[in-house]
């Protein structure tokens, strides 16, 4: 089961991604949590103190594996990546393995093609392993391409009450469909009242985006963020709702 989680910055997708990863692990699944968001904050939601080395920063390794040192502009599209999880992943609570993709600098004179090729090859490898994979994506789902998208079973978009969040999810949905992801659902997060939820649900229905669950706004999640603790270790009503979402995801497979 491979799940990509995306949404506008600040909607709480990282909280949901990290909590789902640990809940699946508690069910006995072998879980790889992939942080593909430039903010690289998934460690907090998982309860891991320090990030492992971001893969994009392993320049020497990337150039060696892709053959980009030659300076010819020719590089391998399928470099060796099968040892990366073991060498550069970090084990966290409940046995979840965290893999941080990192960011790729754009602009300047240096070609970023080898880095992109390496990250996409790594994602393909991760997505086609016999593991449960939870990917915390940026809004632009930048790391995904047609080759990697084939391994994604479900795109879970996170929406908060507000039209900017809904518009972002609309763009994510189009991006996902363009690269072949058609199984998409939404979670409405930070909910404070039923009237607002209904309006958001109506908008998502117009976009043909089923709502899989609703997570209430809760002080416990703010406390977890301030104290750099995993929401699952703090508990609360919101976590109970994420558990329900986890069960609904399982029922789809």
Image: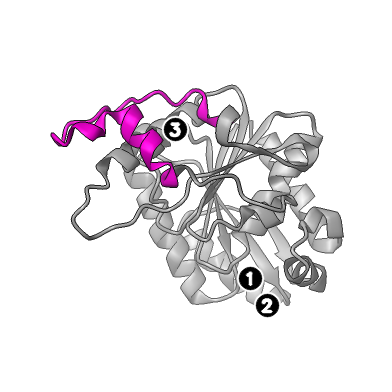
Residue 47, placed above or below residue 87: below
Nearest to the eye among marks 3 and 2: give it: 3
Rendered position, 149 above or below 175: above
Give the magenta-colored segment's residue range.
56-85
Q: Which mark is residue 130?
A: none
Visible residue check, residue 120: no
Residue 61: in magenta span: yes
Tell me the residue that label 3 is attached to. Answer: 122
Q: Position of residue 3 (x, y in %)?
A: 57, 40
Q: Quadrant of residue 150?
A: top left
Q: Is residue 224 left or right of residue 112?
A: right
Quarter of the image for residue 113 reads top left
Q: Earlier in the sequence, mark 3 or mark 1?
A: 3
Q: Position of residue 45 (x, y in %)?
A: 70, 55
Q: Are marks 1 and 2 in contact (CB under 8 Å)?
A: yes
**Along the horizontal axis of the image, is 172 left or right of 73?**
right
Residue ID for mark 1: 198
């Amino acid at each position: 089961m491979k799940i990509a989680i995306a949404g506008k910055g600040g909607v709480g997708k990282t909280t949901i991604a990290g909590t789902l990863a640990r809940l699946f692990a508690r069910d006995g699944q072998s879980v790889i949590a992939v942080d593909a968001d430039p903010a690289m904050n998934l460690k907090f939601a998982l309860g891991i103190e320090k990030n492992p080395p971001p893969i994009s920063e392993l320049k020497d390794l990337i150039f060696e594996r892709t053959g980009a040192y030659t300076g010819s502009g020719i590089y391998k599209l399928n470099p060796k990546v099968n040892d990366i999880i073991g060498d550069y992943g970090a084990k966290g609570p409940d046995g979840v393995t965290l893999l941080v993709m990192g960011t790729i600098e754009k602009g300047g004179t240096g070609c970023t093609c080898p880095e992109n090729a390496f990250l996409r090859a790594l994602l393909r490898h991760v997505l086609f392993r016999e593991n449960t994979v939870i990917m915390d994506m940026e809004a632009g789902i930048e790391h995904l391409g047609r080759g990697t998208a084939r391994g994604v079973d479900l795109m879970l978009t996170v929406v908060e009450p507000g039209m900017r969040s809904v518009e972002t999810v609309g763009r994510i949905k189009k991006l996902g469909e363009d690269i072949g992801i058609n199984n998409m659902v939404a979670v409405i997060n930070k909910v404070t009242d039923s009237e607002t939820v209904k309006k958001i649900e109506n908008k998502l229905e117009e976009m043909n985006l089923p709502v899989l669950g609703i997570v209430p706004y809760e002080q416990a999640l703010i406390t977890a963020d301030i104290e750099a603790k995993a929401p699952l270790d703090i508990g609360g009503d919101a976590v109970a709702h994420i558990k329900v979402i986890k069960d609904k995801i399982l029922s789809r497979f």
